[in-house]
Amino acid sequence: MSRNVTIGKTLIGDNTPTYFIADIAANHDGDFNRAKSLMRLAKEAGANAVKFQHHDVTKYVSDFGFKQLGQKFSHQSGWKKSIFQVYKDAEVPLNWTEGLKKYSEELKIDFFSTPYDLEMVDYLSEFVLAFKIGSGDLAWHAMLSKVAKTKKPVLLATGAGEISEVKNAMDLLLNENKQIILMQCNTNYTGDESNFKFIHLNVLKTYEVMYPDVILGLSDHTKGHETVLGAVSLGAKVIEKHFTDDTTRKGPDHPFSMDPETWREMVIATRKLELSLGSYVKEVQENELETYVLQRRAIRVIQDIREGTQLKIDHFQFQRPCPRDSISINAVNQLVGKLAASDIESGDYLRNEHIQW
């Protein structure tokens, strides 16, 4: 199995640029034109793809169940409306889908979504280039199987999951579909600074060992782009973060989203990092050729040496610069006792033609 995934016309692999997904999620605020505007802004900020979340709230949120909990928790604790109503407001009307797809094609940005019920997989298959499975459905095998069988690329988030659940999910997915992207994730959406210690980017190393032929990624909800740079350094090739135009807007996803400015900064920083990561081969680089001469030490004589003089250690000093044809300072012991093949001016560096070998 080759270590690459193709989404639309974009190849994602070890030697390709990081692929950025702008998750618009609920940030459309129920406005189709606003959804399109966010798609355009994401494209302008450097996103490769936009992602939505398609759901029928009645099929995945129990109004009774959340009220039965007695209180709201985590990122939901500040919501004024009921949990059911917030998710109801976040629905993407099905009559938007074709228009969003067509607009993505105009923008030349990839379009896909997260389905939240099995029927939605069938519906979306006509429109999306790939499927994202959210962390909450990591252990829902029926959903995993349904999505895998579409043969479209699948991005699997693994937040709030045990490694055994990840293994079970990956076994199921890979049995049906080789176009899998495995994403580390933490599902705390509060945006609190303390969340950084729970991201555990090193899990990517574990995934690398377990699935050496699978593309890795990060689905992230922290502020800034520190985690993104860390993930890319550890081999992640796909990054997903929420996207909005204004993080102060009211709504469940705006507070922990990135805006066009911070998104653009993230992409630029990542591109610089990719250049910096470079090759596994250690060698003198083209832009170091001059500093090689400037910073290395040569064997230089500290007095005029006449032809035929027997060289002594006291004749030498190790000084910068070091032209590329210098005799290595590590050969100094081999020079002691040798005869000078020509006159050597005080301060000059030793070259092979100076020595009677």
Image (cartoon, grey):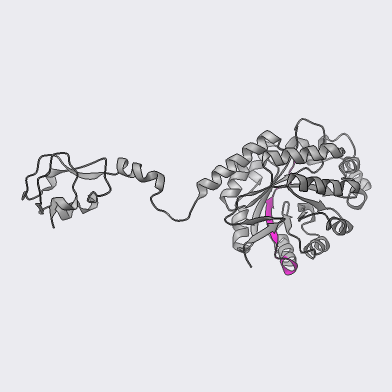
Whether residue 27 is visible here, answered yes or no, is: no
Say which of 182 and 84 sits in front: 182
Residue 310 at x, y percent in the picture:
7, 50
Q: Residue at x 72, y 54 (%)?
A: 158
Q: Quadrant of residue 206?
A: bottom right
Q: Residue furthest bottom?
A: 175
Q: Is 343 on the left-hand or right-hand side of 185? A: left
Placement of the N terminus among the 4 image quadrants: bottom right
Magenta residues, start to end:
174-189
Residue 128 against residue 344 in the figure, above or below = below
Q: Residue furthest front?
A: 106
Q: Residue 78 in the image: state x and y as whole percent.
A: 82, 34
Q: Nearer the viewer, residue 357 or 219?
A: 357
In the figure, residue 143 lies in which quadrant? bottom right
Q: Is residue 351 magenta?
A: no
Residue placed most toward the observer, 92 or 286: 286
Q: Position of residue 280 (x, y in %)?
A: 47, 55
The tally of labels here is 0
Q: Which residue is rendered at x = 68% and y = 39% of the image?
A: 45
From this viewpoint, is residue 77 visible?
yes
The single residue placed furthest to the top in the displayed view is 248
Answer with left or right where residue 298 lies relative to residue 282: left
Residue 209 is situated, as x and y percent measured from the top left of the image, at: 59, 62
**Quadrant of the snapshot with the C terminus:** bottom left
Q: Is residue 297 left or right of residue 153?
A: left
218 sits left or right of 286 in the view? right
